[in-house]
Amino acid sequence: MAKPYNQIVLFGDSLFQGCSNVDQGFSFQGALQHLCMRGLDVVNRGLSGYNTKNALELLPLIFPPPSPANPRIEYLLVLLGANDACLPVPTSSQGVPIDQYKENLIKIITHEHIKAHNPKILLVTPPPLDEIRSFVIDLANGHKEVVRKAAVSAQYSETVRQVAAEVPGVVLVDLQKALMEKAISMTPDYDPSGPPLGYPEGGKRGALEQLLPDGLHMSGEGYKVLFDIVKPHITLPEDYFVYPDWRIMNPGNI
């Protein structure tokens, strides 16, 4: 194994697991790695289907304390909640009650194994849910009723905002707000006096159709929105290269 650099870790569910995909022309993980190439390794610990209960249970295994053999985590991005927000229906056991979700999030970002690394923590709100589309997918997957509701998912995003405000040093990355604003800007006939995009009461998906093709997971264009709001929080010193620049290794006379 090559000697690792210090790390940016992406910790979450399928929204991070799938962020390296290049099929739709943009890879969030690839763009983030390019940003800090030669200074930090971007490590993906997105675990499809996981909720905060699952993430908290495995956290001590995923994040060993720093040591000479383990690199330090400099940035930790946490994106969990899309599965916690599942409704308590007979065909799904992923949901976590919102009070427990808040408690789990706080336990994750204040866990002793995380604190030992002293990372900058970026807490990301789950994206908006296009319930119009996700319900169609639910039925196709064998569910007999809606598994996720847009209004409920929005409440979980609001909980992330609360946690970011309450825990000192945590930075909020409001993906839910940024994606909805992007969708509205791309939907010329959107009526702000009506229900939000993706809500069945309004019956209009608008540009969420492009940003969240299955109603839940982001397209390349959606991940670009995430990158644009994460990038300003990644600050690298001028001399962040771990190994010397080639001009130092091969000095010339110019």
Image: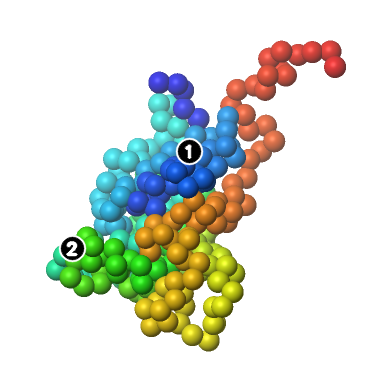
Label 2: how many residues lie within 10 Å, few (<14), some (14-19) or many (20+)? Answer: few
Q: Are marks 2 and 1 in contact (CB under 8 Å)?
A: no
Q: Report the front residue among 104 and 154.
A: 154
Who's the residue at 36% across and 72% down the image?
Answer: 132
Q: Horizontally, is 50 left or right of 105 in the view? A: left
Residue at which label 1 appears? 42
| Image x and y of residue 28, in percent | 50, 46
Q: Position of residue 238 (x, y in %)?
A: 69, 36
Does 198 appear above or below 214? below
Residue 1 % position (x, y)? 40, 21
Residue at 30 percent across and 50 percent down: it is 48
Amino acid on which disc 2 is placed: Gly
Eyeballing the image, is 192 above or below 64? below
- Who is closer to the viewer here, 59 or 51? 51
Q: Which mark is residue 102?
A: none
Residue type of the residue flagged with mark 1: Val
Closer to the chain start, of discs 2 and 1, is 1
Q: Secondary structure at mark 1?
A: strand
In the rendering, which numbered label is found on residue 142? 2
Work out how far the residue at label 2 is from the one at label 1, CA to CA, in angstroms. 36 Å
- Image x and y of residue 89, in percent: 18, 70
How many labels were placed on the picture? 2
- Quarter of the view holding residue 67: top left
Along the line of sight, the residue nearer the viewer: 222 or 5: 222
Q: Residue at point 38% right, 38% down? A: 65
